[in-house]
Structure formats: C-alpha cells, structure tokens
Image: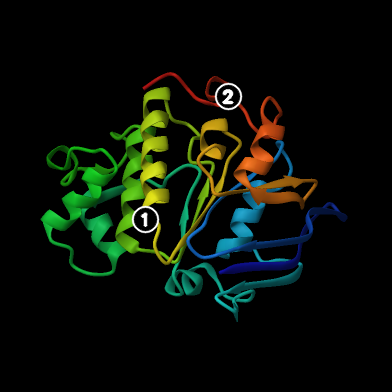
Amino acid sequence: MLELRNLSFSVENDGVKKEIIHDLNLVVNDNTFVVVTGPNGSGKSTLAKLIVGIERPTEGRILLDGSDITDLGITERARKGMGFAFQQPVRFKGIRVVTLLRLAAGRDLSVSEACDYLSEVGLCAQDYIRREVNASLSGGELKRIEIATVLARHSRLTVFDEPEAGIDLWSFQNLIRIFESMRRNIRDSSMIIISHQERILNIADEIAVLADGAIVRHGARADIFPDLIGTESAQGTCNRLRRDV
C-alpha cells in the first residue's frame, strides 16, 4: 500500500517560490489500478516523480507498506519494489532488448523467458529479442519494450507517466489491451497511471483527480468517470495522439 501524507513540493525561480503540489493526500491499496488525471499544469508528472524518488517533497511523508520512504532515492525505492515507466522511454544505444529484460528481472533470464515477456506486450520475440534499444525503434515499440521490462521486474508498485505520449493510434490501441491484461492479472502489486485519456480512465479501478496541486476527488471509476467526460481531465484519443508511425 502506498500512502501520501500532506505532501507538498515547491520550486524557487529568481527568488520567487512556486508551490506545485500542495498538502496532497492519497492512498493506493494493494491490487489496485489507479489513474491520476487532471488538467494540464495540475502537477501530475511532478507527483509521479515524487512517488518514485526523482524529486523530494518540501513537506509531508511517503509510506510504502507502512515504511517511511520519504528520504530514499530512486534506486533505494526500486529495491523496495517500486517501478517507473517514463513518459518518453529511454533509448540505450549498444544494449540489446534481451539484456535490458535481464537487467530489469535482476537475473539471467533465458532467451525463452525473455521472449515470453515480449509476447505479452504483443511483440514478435524473434524480431526484437536481439535488437538494440536505440533510435531504430518507434515510440510505440519502445513503450511496449519498457512495459515488458516492468513485467519482468514484478514490481510491488509501478508508476506510468502518460504512457500514451508520443505514440501513434495503432500503438495506443495495443497499449490499452496490455493495460487491460495487466489489470486482470494484477497480484500483490498496484499500478498508478498518470493520464487524461478517456480509454485509460475507463479501465481503472479508481480515479484520482488532481487540480492546483491537490487531490480534489478520489474514488471508484464508476463514481467519477462520468463527470469527467468531455473535460480537460478526460480527453478523447484523437486529442493527444500522433498519427505517424
């Protein structure tokens, strides 16, 4: 279980202090798929970075399974079972897909095991297992390979920051299918997705709405999603996705 208690985060620019996250409280229970949404500039990506340890809160505490992890860095949080999928996946020139999967798993996966993870995200393992994670891969391919590393890692809590960013419509449709499968098979873990895509919101267990740096609503999808349709917090597919492959 993840608990955010009275979390605040501010930055200072030219002597002017700006508060991005303000007195935020959120609980994410085990075996739960939560989507955090909100208008642009509401602090969604900053919240993701605070949860995984890229940024440190100005005030408040972060607890994972009852342990205070507020002062732990991203590597220490990863060791405690926390994973993070970037808005734009990192490219690793010179590293092959099979090597990346082995690093994520923390053990010497067999080629067969690595192929299974690629198959789960809809990639033909034979075509990708030996490829380098570099500029030759499209945004959609990189996104699915990154999700395969998440599956290989078996994180207790995984945070996805706007996974739909920079991918084409076909890849987005496959992404939805992958998330639906992950939600059905969620065991002893939780997922947080930062997104305001209607189709991602519509497969969540719970939705948390962020506005002006604070959670203003949080509850079951059925209670919150209908009120978001047509707002900046729930955009249709065509509003956000690139159509180039």
Q: Which mark is residue 150?
A: 1
Query: Real-space Cα distance between discs 1 and 2?
Result: 26 Å
Residue 71 seen from this side: yes
Quadrant for the N terminus in the image: bottom right
Question: Residue 27: which quarter of the image?
Answer: bottom right
Name the residue at 23% across, 38% down: 123
**Residue placed under numbered mark 2 in the picture:** 236
Q: Position of residue 53 (x, y in %)?
A: 58, 65
Quadrant for the C terminus in the image: top left
Name the residue at 52% across, 37% down: 200
Question: Residue 167: which quarter of the image?
Answer: top left
Residue lying furthest right in this view?
Answer: 16
Looking at numbered disc 1 in the image, what kind of residue is underneath it?
Val
Looking at numbered disc 2 in the image, what kind of residue is underneath it?
Gly
Label 1 secondary element: helix
Residue lying furthest front in this view?
Answer: 222
Name the residue at 64% across, 68% down: 3
Q: Assess disc 1: are there few (<14), some (14-19) or many (≥20) residues with their C-alpha within 10 Å of its C-alpha.
A: many
Q: Assess disc 2: are there few (<14), some (14-19) or many (≥20) residues with their C-alpha within 10 Å of its C-alpha.
A: some
